[in-house]
Image (cartoon, helix red, strand yellow):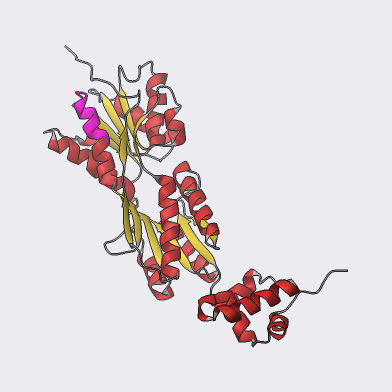
Amino acid sequence: MARNRIRLSEVAREAGVSPATVSRAISQPDLLSPETLARVRRAADHLGYRPDAAARALASGRSMTIGAVMPTLDNAIFSKALQAMQAQLAEDGYQLLVASHDYSKAAEAECIRTLLARGVDGLILVGAERIAEAAQLLAQSGLPVVMTWCAPDGAPSVLVDNEYAGLLATRHLIALGHRRIGVITGATRFNDRQRGRYRGVRRALEEAGLTLPPALACEQATTLAGGRMGCAQLLDLAEPPTAIVGGIDLIAIGCMVEAQARGLAIPADLSVAGIDDLDMSAHVSPSLTTVHVPTARIGTEAARMMVAILRDEPGPTTLTLPVDLIVRRSTGPALTRG
C-alpha cells in the first residue's frame, strides 16, 4: 500500500517547532540558528519528508524556474547556449523553460507573456531590440532580465562584440590581399547581432581604404540554403568578389557548397570566412576559417548572472566575452588577375 505523503506540519510537530519555522528551513535556512536548522533537518530525515517543487515555491515565493526566449531552436548556436544554460541552472536548483519566436518580434512578445504567466522567476533574452509591447511586459513584471549577445547600456548582460567579430574576419581577408570582398548576413532589420557583424565588415574595409558596393552585400536566411543563394547572387556579378564573409558559419558553409557546385576551388578561386565557430566548421572540407564566439559560455554565464541576481549576491552585471579569429583552410591569398 502506498505510503501517505508526509506533511510539513508533521515535520514541525516532530521537531518541536512551528510550521513557519519548517517553511523557513526550506526557503531561507540562513535565517535559522544552526541548532534549530539541524533539528528540523533531523525530523525531516526521520520522517522521510522531501519538499516538492510546489512546496518550495510556496515557501519561498519562487517557482525555481527561469524562462529563456530564443530566436530559433533550429540552430546549433542557440541550442548549445541553452544546453549550457540548463546545466548551470540545474546545478543551482532551477529548471529552464524555453520558448522561441523564429525572429518575429511580435511572437517574442507572446513568448514573454506566456513565460510570465507560467510564473518564472526571471527571463534570459537574446539581443537588445524588442517591440514596445514586449518592453512593457518586462517593465511591468518587475522580474530580473539578463540579455545575451547584445544589450542596451546598463542592462544585466552577457555580451560579445559582434562588430569586432566582423572586423576580425574581414581584416584577415584584407591581409591575404583581397580587395573585392562580399558579405552575406541574415536579415539585419530585427537582428542586432547580424547588423553589428555587417558594421564590422564595413569598418575593416574603410580602415583599409576600400569600399563595400551595395551589390557585394546581401541578406539571406541564416541557413545553408541562404548561404548558397547569397553566394550565387554574388558570383553572378560581372565582377564577383574574391572573398566572402558569412554573417554566421552556416551561411559561410552554404557559400562553399555553392562555389564548389560551380566548379570553383576553395580557397584558390574564392576565400570564405564565417563567424561563430560551430563544431561542424572544423570538419567541413576545406575546414572553415571563422571567428570563435564562446556560445556555451554565454549560456553558462547568463545562468550564473541570473541566479546571482535572484540571490542578491554581488557580482558583475555586464560581462563581455572575447571573440577570436580561427584560421583554417577556407581562406588563402587573393589570385592575381592580369
Q: Does the magenta stretch include residue 177?
A: yes
Would you say residue 97 is visible in this rendering?
no
The residue at the point 34 percent across, 24 percent down is 330
Left or right, 67 with respect to 47, comes to left
In this view of the protein, which residue sits in the foreground, 149 or 189? 149
In this view of the protein, which residue sits in the foreground, 180 or 172? 172
Quadrant where the N terminus lies? bottom right
Image height check: is 289 above or below 89?
above
Left or right, 322 with respect to 105, comes to left
Q: In which quarter of the image is residue 310?
A: bottom left
The residue at the point 19 percent across, 37 percent down is 204
Provide the major secondary structure of the magenta segment: helix
In this view of the protein, which residue sits in the foreground, 227 or 16? 16
Q: Is residue 176 magenta?
A: yes
Instruction: List the single residue furthest toward the left.
Output: 209
Magenta stretch: give its range.
169-178
Image height check: is 67 above or below 142?
above
**Horizontal and vertical percent position of residue 29:** 54, 76
Image height check: is 214 above or below 98?
above
